[in-house]
Each structure stands twice: as structure tokens, then as C-alpha cells.
Image (spheres, rainbow, N blue to C red):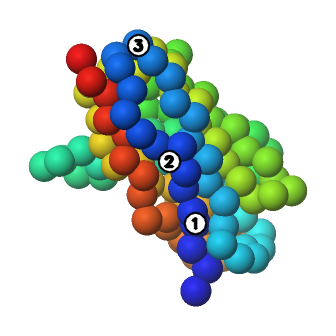
């Protein structure tokens, strides 16, 4: 089964930056929307940002102006540039891709820890 593989997580001080990347382990056809979700301990998974095939983006209010999502359609790869990180951004970040047939793919998650 095809999965998404995330990379780029780690430990950073508050105010720092990280860049997450996500690519499929195999072929996924007709991807429409790709996005990043996060889940902090004791909290529900929430949408951080998403981007459609045409480039339309959507951000959670908590990350607007600090995070930027982008994608390379030729490589089915999605990126999340995270600037001005805060301790409350600490979470496991998951990559998601949904195709035109509404099949959803997930990654295993990558830990992002922001120290104060």
C-alpha cells in the first residue's frame, strides 16, 4: 500500500524555523488536495494547511502569516515552511493526500518540538 513519507521534523527553539517535506512511497494518481495536520498530546488532530492541485491554499488561523504550504505537482510532493515557531506548535505533524476519487493517504507523522 502506498504511504506518504514525511521528513524535516525536529527540535527547534521558539522563533526558529523548520521545513517539512512529504512525498509518496509509490505512485498515487490524480491527487487533488495535499495538506498537513498536527496532533498535540491530549488534543484532536487538526488541519494546519492544505493546497489544491491548482494552488489554492487554506490555513488554520493559528498559523496564518507564519507557515507557508507549497507543492510540486510533478513529484506529488508537498512542503510546509514553518517560521516564527512557538511552543504551542509542538505536535506530531501528518501529511495527507486526497485524490479525485476521495481516497485519502496518510503519512506516519514527524515530531516537531519547539522549546521556549
Q: Earlier in the sequence, mark 2 or mark 3?
A: 3
| Residue drawn 32% across the image and 28% down it | 114
Q: Quadrant of the C terminus?
A: top left
Q: Mark 3 points at which residue?
A: 15
Q: Foreground residue, 45 or 41?
A: 41
Query: Residue 68, percent across and down?
Result: 60, 28
Identify residue for label 1: 4
Q: Which of marks 2 and 3 is in front?
A: 3
What element does badge 2 sit on?
A: strand
Label 1 SS: strand
Q: How far apart are marks 1 and 2 (CA)?
A: 11 Å
- The mark closer to the camera, 1 or 2, is 1
Circle 3 Cα neighbour tier, 10 Å, few/some/many (<14 / 14–19 / ≥20): some
**Residue 42 appears at what percent x and percent y?**
13, 49
Residue 28 sits above or below residue 6 on the image: below
Q: Distance between the residues labelled 1 and 3?
A: 28 Å
Secondary structure of the residue carrying tag 3 is loop
Question: Extreme bottom residue here?
Answer: 1
Q: Tell me which numbered mark, 1 or 3, is placed earlier along the sequence.
A: 1
* Side (left or right) of 107 relative to 89: right
Task: Tell me which corner region of the image, top left, top right, bottom left or bottom right, holds residue 40.
Answer: top left
Q: Nearer the viewer, mark 1 or mark 3?
A: 3
Of 99 and 90, nearer the camera is: 90
Q: Which residue lies furthest to the left in this view?
A: 42
**Position of 13 compared to 108: left or right?**
left
Residue at 49 percent of width and 64 percent of height: 107
Amino acid at each position: 500500500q502506498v504511504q506518504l513519507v514525511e521528513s524535516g521534523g525536529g527540535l527547534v527553539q521558539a522563533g526558529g524555523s523548520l521545513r517539512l517535506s512529504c512525498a509518496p512511497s509509490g505512485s498515487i494518481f490524480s491527487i487533488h488536495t495535499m495538506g498537513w495536520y498536527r496532533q498535540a498530546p491530549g488534543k484532536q488532530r487538526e488541519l494546519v494547511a492544505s493546497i489544491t492541485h491548482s494552488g489554492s491554499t487554506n490555513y488554520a488561523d493559528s498559523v496564518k502569516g507564519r507557515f507557508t504550504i507549497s507543492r510540486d505537482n510533478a513529484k506529488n510532493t508537498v512542503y510546509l515552511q514553518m517560521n516564527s515557531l512557538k511552543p504551542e506548535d509542538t505536535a506530531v505533524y501528518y501529511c495527507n493526500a486526497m485524490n479525485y476519487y476521495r481516497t485519502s493517504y496518510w503519512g506516519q507523522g514527524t515530531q516537531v518540538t519547539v522549546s521556549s
